[in-house]
Image: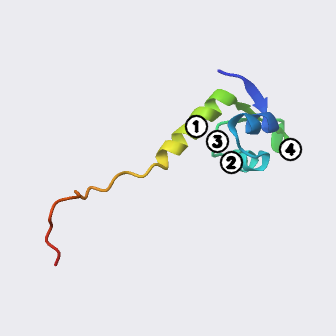
Amino acid sequence: MGQKALLKEAATAVGLTKNALYQLARAGEVPCIRIGGPHGRYVFDIEQLEDFLKQKALENVRQPDKQEYGKLRVVR
């Protein structure tokens, strides 16, 4: 486990706004620990958060089309 941080420090460390990270955490879309009940604080493991965001970024990479360029094809 890496360095732990609260919302503001974690957002700064990974390059997100505080509000953006809060919304992701509240929706359960990023790995975090909630301490203190419904009005508690979010604690983030910076290393896990960075790995998660890297994985999400890779999912956004478009896959190349299967079409082969440079070959003639029949158009009907």
Furthest residue toward top:
1
Amino acid of disc 3:
Val
How far across and how far down the image is residue 46, in percent?
Answer: 68, 29
**Foreground: disc 3 or disc 1:** 1
Q: Are marks 3 and 2 in contact (CB under 8 Å)?
A: yes
Cβ atoms at labels 1 and 2 below 8 Å apart: no
**CA gap, disc 3 and disc 1:** 7 Å
- From the image, state whether disc 2 or disc 4 is nearer to you: 2
Left or right of residue 39, residue 10 in this image: left
Q: For mark 1, what is the residue? A: 52
Mark 4 residue element? helix
Task: For label 1, count other residues whose C-alpha is less than 10 Å away and answer few (under 14), some (14-19) or many (20+).
Answer: some
Residues at marks 3 and 2, CA–CA distance in whole angstroms: 6 Å
Q: Secondary structure at mark 1?
A: helix
Alpha-carbon span between mark 1 and mark 2: 12 Å
Identify residue for label 2: 24
Q: Amino acid at mark 1?
A: Phe
Q: How many residues crowd mark 3 within 10 Å: few (<14), some (14–19), many (20+)? A: some
- Tell me the residue that label 4 is attached to: 39
Give the number of callouts.
4
Q: Earlier in the sequence, mark 2 or mark 4?
A: 2
Q: Alpha carbon of mark 2 to alpha carbon of mark 4: how far?
A: 16 Å
Mark 3 falls on what kind of element? loop
Q: Earlier in the sequence, mark 1 or mark 2?
A: 2
